[in-house]
Image (cartoon, grey):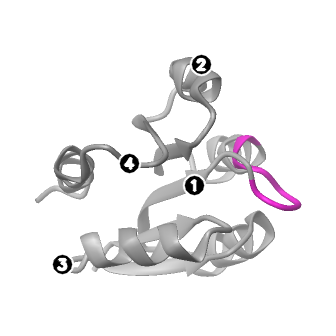
Amino acid sequence: MDKILIIDDNNCIRTMLKSLLNEHEVLEAKDGETGVTILKKEKNIKLVITDYQLPGIDGLEIIKWLKVYRPEMAIILISACTKIIVGAKKLEIEHAFPKPFQDTDHILKEINRIMGR
């Protein structure tokens, strides 16, 4: 089964997303370093949902790493910074959502599309 990795230092965001994605197998990382470690070990992750602002390795570094080592990976960026969300199209990722989330139905629909459901 394909998995989703959520990388966010905010436990509330990770918990909310995991609850929203209850039909999917979800892995969690509280920082970028842990996220990259999981990505190196787990080969059946199809989607990474990453925050931009993370301690240590940030979301931009994770995206760059994925583009080199896991180019097939779908990526969704989440951020409380509007400028980051607006500029996300340049990163060639699937989608970017602002925090706090306004429309979880839209987020779930996009994730299900990516995951082939």
Return the residue at label 4.
Answer: 101
* Element under disc 4: loop
Mark 3 or mark 1, earlier in chain:
3
Q: What kind of residue is marked 4? A: Phe
What label sits on residue 17 in the rendered view? none
What label sits on residue 23 in the rendered view? 3
CA separation in Å, label 2 and label 4? 18 Å
Q: What kind of residue is marked 1? A: Thr
User: Residue 117 at x, y = what percent?
Assistant: 11, 59
- Please tell me in which quadrant of the rendered image residue 46 appears: bottom left
> Is residue 38 visible in this depiction of the protein?
yes
Answer above or below: position of 24 versus 80: below
Mark 2 or mark 1, earlier in chain:
1
Pointers 2 and 4 in contact (C-beta within 8 Å): no
Mark 3 or mark 2, earlier in chain:
3
What label sits on residue 87 in the rendered view? 2
Q: Is the magenta stretch mostly helix, strand or loop?
A: loop
CA separation in Å, label 4 and label 1? 14 Å
Return the residue at label 1.
Answer: 50
Q: How many labels does the image show?
A: 4
CA separation in Å, label 3 and label 1? 19 Å
